[in-house]
Image (cartoon, helix red, strand yellow):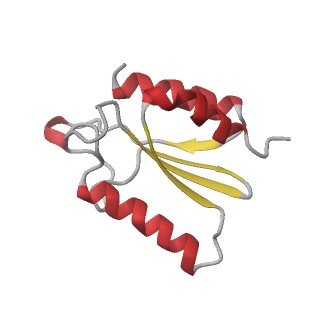
Amino acid sequence: MTEQQFTNELLKWLKQFKWRAFHVRNSGAGGMTQVQGDKGFPDILAIRPPRILVAELKVGKPGTLKGDPTPEQVAWLDAFKMASYTWKWSNIETYVWYPQMFPAILEILAEGLQ
């Protein structure tokens, strides 16, 4: 499964479980995109009050260059975690997800759905 296929499948399930989701595709040549900001922003930002979910998606084997988040991605995930500790945003959840985790991912997405 490619990261794009993984992303597309996850976006379908987010919609199914009534999450509002945001994903930016890198659409420019040479890694350039129209979106500005710090490098490494997570692949998925989703909200279904009171929960906020931030996820980095990886398709490589954990523990490998392609399977682990980059330092910039880790910095973003850590910033979201810190925001959940220091602000009153205790409902921010941060994840690094792999395709083989799909059953667990679906359980997380379904939590609290009424």
Between 99 and 24, which is closer to the camera in this rendering? 99
Residue 2 falls left or right of residue 8: left
Q: Nearer the viewer, residue 42 or 28?
A: 42
Relative to 33, residue 91 above or below: below
What residue appears at the point 47 percent right and 47 percent down from the top-left corner? 55
Question: Would you place residue 79 above or below residue 73 in this image?
Answer: below
- Outermost residue toward the front? 63
Quarter of the picture holding the C terminus:
top right
Residue drawn 78% across the image and 46% down it: 112
Residue 45 % position (x, y):
52, 49
Is 111 left, or right, of 108 in this rendering? Answer: right
Residue at 71% x, 34% y is: 17
- Residue 80, relative to residue 95: is it above or below? below
Q: Is residue 64 left or right of residue 99?
A: left
Q: Position of residue 96 (x, y in %)?
A: 43, 46
Identify the residue at image location x=80%, y=41%.
113
Q: Position of residue 39 (x, y in %)?
A: 27, 57
Which quarter of the picture shows residue 38? bottom left
Q: Splitting the image into 4 quarters, where does residue 56 fall?
A: top left
